[in-house]
Image (cartoon, rainbow, N blue to C red):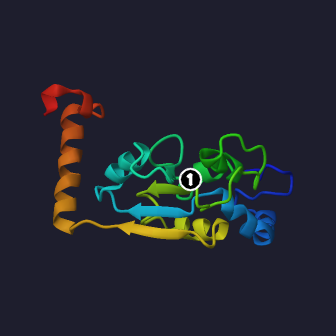
């Protein structure tokens, strides 16, 4: 992906992108999340996301869009480029590093949550290459309860389809 200001391929895995990131990553990181929350599936990420989105703490904001962006873990999302990802936190950004407030300022802490960052090999490398000072929190759940919950969701999905949450006959 193109980095947004014509300098090179900051969103991809190309050689120029690596040079660009090495040169700009300190200033780039301030426009992304200052906290990344990862966890296994069924560990409570959805509940945490919901609480933050509803304004649990006014100083904390989650990214716009879908609950889990999977930007750093899915190759097709990562290829969209860093400017695309920056706009989740700063929708009016016109170029990389053009965010309106410093990352982690007293006013706002931006948080990104994703279960796929927990076990996808490239995710941690990509995250820390773009945001070397990001803080990471890991949500874990007792393994047997997590496995039971995962099984129940898969079973209900098989039984009722992907729209199971909206079907009263599934509950």
Q: Please, is residue 67 above or below residue 137 in the view?
A: above
Question: Number of marks in the image?
Answer: 1
Judging depth in this view, the residue of 8 and 87 nearest the camera is 87
The residue carrying mark 1 is 71
Quadrant of the image occupied by residue 103: bottom right
**Residue 70: x percent and y percent?**
51, 52
Residue, x 16% and y 65% (percent of image)?
Answer: 144
**Residue 138: x percent and y percent?**
39, 68
Where does the C terminus fall, quadrant-wise?
top left
**Residue 76: x percent and y percent?**
59, 49
Residue, x 66% and y 50% (percent of image)?
Answer: 86
Residue, x 23% and y 46% (percent of image)?
Answer: 154
Q: Left or right: where does residue 56 sit relative to residue 162?
A: right
Q: Please, is residue 126 above or below residue 87 in the view?
A: below
Q: Left or right: where does residue 28 sit relative to residue 134?
A: right
Judging depth in this view, the residue of 60 and 46 nearest the camera is 60
Q: Residues within 10 Å of mark 1 (few under 14, many from 20)?
A: many
Q: Please, is residue 44 above or below residue 19 in the view?
A: above
Residue, x 29% and y 31% (percent of image)?
Answer: 163
Classify mark 1: helix, strand or loop: loop
Judging depth in this view, the residue of 133 and 161 nearest the camera is 133
Q: Left or right: where does residue 6 sit relative to residue 124?
A: right
Quadrant of the image occupied by residue 156: top left
**Residue 45: x percent and y percent?**
35, 55
């Amino acid at each position: 992906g193109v980095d947004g200001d014509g300098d090179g391929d900051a969103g991809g895995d190309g050689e120029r992108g690596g040079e660009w990131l090495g040169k700009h990553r300190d200033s780039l990181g301030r426009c992304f999340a200052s906290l990344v929350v990862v966890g296994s599936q069924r560990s409570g990420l959805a509940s945490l996301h919901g609480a933050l989105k509803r304004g649990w703490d006014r100083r904390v904001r989650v990214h716009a869009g879908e609950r889990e962006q999977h930007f750093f873990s899915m190759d097709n999302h990562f290829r969209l480029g860093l400017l695309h990802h920056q706009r989740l936190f700063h929708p009016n950004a016109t170029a990389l590093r053009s965010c309106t407030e410093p990352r982690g300022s007293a006013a706002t802490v931006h948080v990104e949550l994703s279960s796929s960052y927990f076990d996808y090999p490239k995710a941690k490398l990509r995250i820390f290459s773009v945001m070397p000072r990001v803080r990471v929190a890991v949500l874990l759940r007792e393994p047997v309860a997590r496995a039971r919950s995962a099984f129940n969701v898969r079973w209900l999905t098989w039984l009722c389809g992907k729209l199971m949450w909206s079907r009263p006959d599934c509950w």
